[in-house]
Amino acid sequence: MPGKPLDPSSPRALLGAELRVARERAAMSQAGLGERLFVSGSYVGQMEAGTRRITPELAASIDGILGTNGFFTRNSVEQGKSKYPEHFEEAAEAEAEALTIREYAPLVIPGLLQTEAYAREIFHAYQPTAPQAVIDELTEARLDRAKLLADPTTPLFWCVLDEAVIRRAVGRRGVMTDALRHIIGLIRARRIIVQVIPFSAGAHASLMGPLKLMAFENAPPLAYLQGNGTGMLLDDPATVARHALTYDLLTASALSPTDSLAQIESAAEEHAHDQHS
């Protein structure tokens, strides 16, 4: 399968390549292996592409089906524990491999766009009694994710923000102003695309919650739905297509990127004025 060379620093990608070799040696399709594993063929494709982790449970079944003498069981354990919360770890790993990320955020600034101070405020709000060491660890992991945007071109990141995201004051004096100015800087550097859905738009296609869509070079797309402490990574083609339509409808309800930038700048000025007052 054509594509970029495997990253030798990514055990997940290398193990996925070995899975593809073993499956093809057994003359089995992705759908055929998926049926034996009780997952979809798309899921197998994601494992082979390195965008989904081969869990120890699946690895044991793969070894039994493909006769690989414990190879995948041994190596799946060596991949180590994720630094992200369990409900988000697969999504975070897939995000790091994505060519395009499209995200709708109804309540808070997306993690990839958060400043350190904003992230800390969010984690303190979620876990008000957590030790500082836990907050530090979560914040560090979130900022590490944001390094994805250090590359000038990949991934393409396009987000739609509800107006509530930019109007709600999060944190102590100056936190919200700096958070919005960070987004403004990324927009003006032409690194991200941002649209805002104003309150005046009324009802729209995703009032029920956030949405993230990820597309890859050599693997099927994924959709990620997140709740409070929960998350679902979806690979069923029809389901992903339905959520992609939802995102398209959101962009149609939102302001243009130019008008959205003006809205964010206005909100930043208002937060700055409130700060000085």
Image: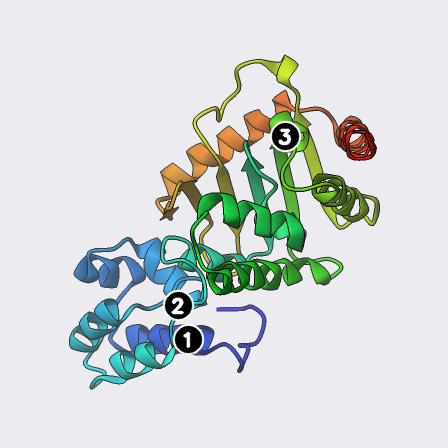
Q: Who's the residue at 25% across and 79% down the image?
A: 73
Residue closer to the observer: 137 or 212: 137
Residue at 23% across, 60% down: 32
List the residue tagged with mark 3: 168
In front: label 2 or label 3? 3
Q: Position of residue 8 (x, y in %)?
A: 53, 82
Q: Residue at x 72, y 41 (%)?
A: 173
Horizontal arrangement in the rendering, residue 194 relative to residue 55 (left or right): right
Asked where in the image residue 198 lies, by quadrant, the reply is top right
Which residue in the protein does label 2 denote?
Answer: 48
Q: In the rendered view of the protein, which quadrant contains the C terminus?
A: top right
The mark lying in front, picked from 3 and 1, is 3
Which quarter of the figure has residue 83?
bottom left
Q: Where is residue 154 drawn, in percent x and y? A: 67, 58
Query: Looking at the image, how many numbered discs can be counted on the residues?
Result: 3
Tell me: 245 left or right of 17.
Answer: right
Gap in angstroms between the C-alphas marked 1 and 2 = 6 Å
Query: Which callout, 1 or 2, points at the residue further toward the start of the chain?
Result: 1
Report whether residue 90 is seen.
Answer: yes
Q: Amino acid at mark 2?
A: Glu
Identify the mark nearer the N-term, 3 or 1: 1
Q: Is residue 187 above or below residue 59?
A: above
Left or right of 199: which side holds 245?
A: left
Neighbor class of circle 2 (other Cα within 10 Å; few <14, some 14-19, many 20+) is: many
| Kind of residue at badge 3 | Arg
C-alpha separation, residue under disc 2 versus residue under disc 3:
42 Å
Indicate the position of residue 107 as horizontal and vertical percent values: 55, 33
Q: Residues within 10 Å of mark 3 (few under 14, many from 20)?
A: few
Determine the secondary structure under disc 2. Answer: helix
Q: Residues within 10 Å of mark 1 (few under 14, many from 20)?
A: some
Q: Which residue is mark 1?
A: 17
Type of amino acid at the residue the image marks with label 1: Ala
